[in-house]
Image (cartoon, rainbow, N blue to C red):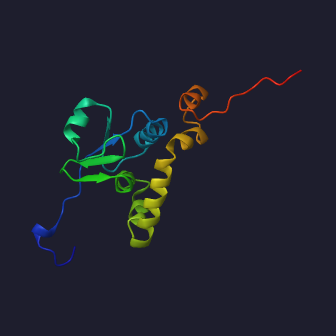
Amino acid sequence: MAGASGSDLIAAPTRLSVVYDDQCNLCRRCRAWLEQQSQLVPLSFAPASDPAVRSWAGDWIPVGDELVVVADSGAVWVGPDAFITCLWALSSHRKLSQRLQAPGMHAVAKQAFHALSAGRGVASILLGAVSEVDECDAGLCTPVFDQPH
């Protein structure tokens, strides 16, 4: 950053912890995908149901309700910004993350993330991330009736 003093610079994180909803099949699939990607910044994962995570987050971070990313510096991103931060950590998606941070694209990225998040049960089914049993347990399947012969 040209003209910035040393105190104005913010160090980039060297490690990120991703708190995800381990009760959500789509979220677990996204975690697996992130783990398979080449990472410029190492990602570690913590399930939102972990009592230690809930204790740490307290009431001020919506763990389980939102994707949360915590940097080794203590910086915290929630929801769409957490997703963009995960993309930034990946070698093949850093440029995309930078595009999604642009003013016009950031609003679109937020809307897309919130829409997917709100419908993640249905998205899990459409992406094949849940079994038929999970679909029915979630009240999202249609009963099949035997046809009369």
- Relative to 14, 118 lies left or right: right
Say which quarter of the image contains residue 47: top left
Say which quarter of the image contains residue 141: top right
Say which quarter of the image contains residue 2: bottom left
**The C terminus is located in which quarter?**
top right
> x and y percent of residue 100 in the render?
42, 64
Residue 136 against residue 57 in the figure, above or below: above
Foreground of the two, 8 or 14: 8
> x and y percent of residue 83 in the render?
39, 52
Residue at 40%, 46% (x, y): give it.
38
Foreground of the two, 55 or 144: 144
In the displayed image of the protein, which residue is found farthest to the top? 149
Residue at 86%, 22% (x, y): give it.
148
In the displayed image of the protein, which residue is found farthest to the right? 149
Tally of marks:
0
Residue at 50%, 50% (x, y): give it.
116
> x and y percent of residue 18 in the render?
32, 43
**The N terminus is located in which quarter?**
bottom left
- Relative to 131, 76 lies left or right: left
> x and y percent of residue 140 in the render?
59, 35
In the displayed image of the protein, which residue is found farthest to the bottom? 3
Residue 133 against residue 26 in the figure, above or below: above
Foreground of the two, 106 or 134: 134
Residue at 50%, 44% (x, y): give it.
120
